[in-house]
Amino acid sequence: MSGFPEFITRDRPPQHVLSRRRISRKELEKLLSVHARYQQGAWDGRRVVLLRCDLSGMDLQGIDLSGADIIECDFSDTDLSNAKLERTTLAGCRFENSRLDAASLCGADLSRSDFEKADLRGTDLADATLAGARLGTAEMGESPRTGLPTNIDTRMLDRIAIQRRRH
């Protein structure tokens, strides 16, 4: 919302929080539209806020939810290839068996998230918060689509290697 004076943005209605429900594709399309307007700084835009929602098994290739708050949601068996989730709060989310091939999670908060058997090849995790995240069985390396490697802090890779040796 940069470039807008405070008096234009401060009186916006509060964000609507969706909680404890299965999100349908139709609902998601509406959320993405409203969130896109929020990202552009439009007066009628709203930031997506999801709490303990179920998005498992969905095809979410290429979605842009940068800056959203998505807490303890289930993305198991979901295709998030090429998704843009930069600066998104994804704390406590489940990404088991999900594809995040070439996704951008730069600056995302992934604290306590579970990436059991997730495909993180080519995923950009630069500056992501990974405290307590489970990455031990996640697949990392070069993306078969883009040829880009997983971008992750090398200290985190050392911890993952130690976890894998223990199992």
Image (spheres, helix red, strand yellow):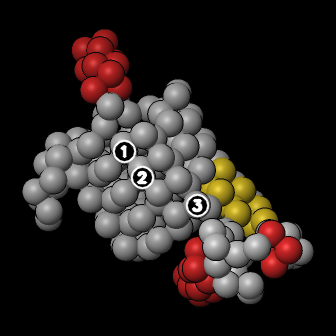
Q: Answer with mark 1 or mark 2, whichever residue precedes in sequence.
A: 2
Please state which of residues 72 and 9 is positioned toward the viewer in this rendering. Answer: 9
Question: Circle 1 is placed at which residue position?
Answer: 125
What count of labels does the image hold? 3
The label shown at residue 20 is none
Query: Which corner quadrant of the image does residue 34 belong to?
Result: bottom right
Q: Which mark is residue 67?
A: 3
Whether residue 74 is visible to the viewer of this picture, yes or no, is no
Q: Which residue is mark 2?
A: 105
Dot 3, crowdedness within 10 Å: few (<14), some or many (≥20)?
many
Q: Is residue 45 left or right of residue 81?
A: right
- Seen at 36% across and 72% down, the residue is 61
- Spatial CA distance of label 1 from label 2 is 5 Å
Q: Earlier in the sequence, mark 2 or mark 3?
A: 3
Residue 135, percent from left and from top: 38, 34
Drawn side of residue 166 relative to residue 66, left or right? left
Seen in the picture, residue 93 relative to 3 is either above or below; the reply is above
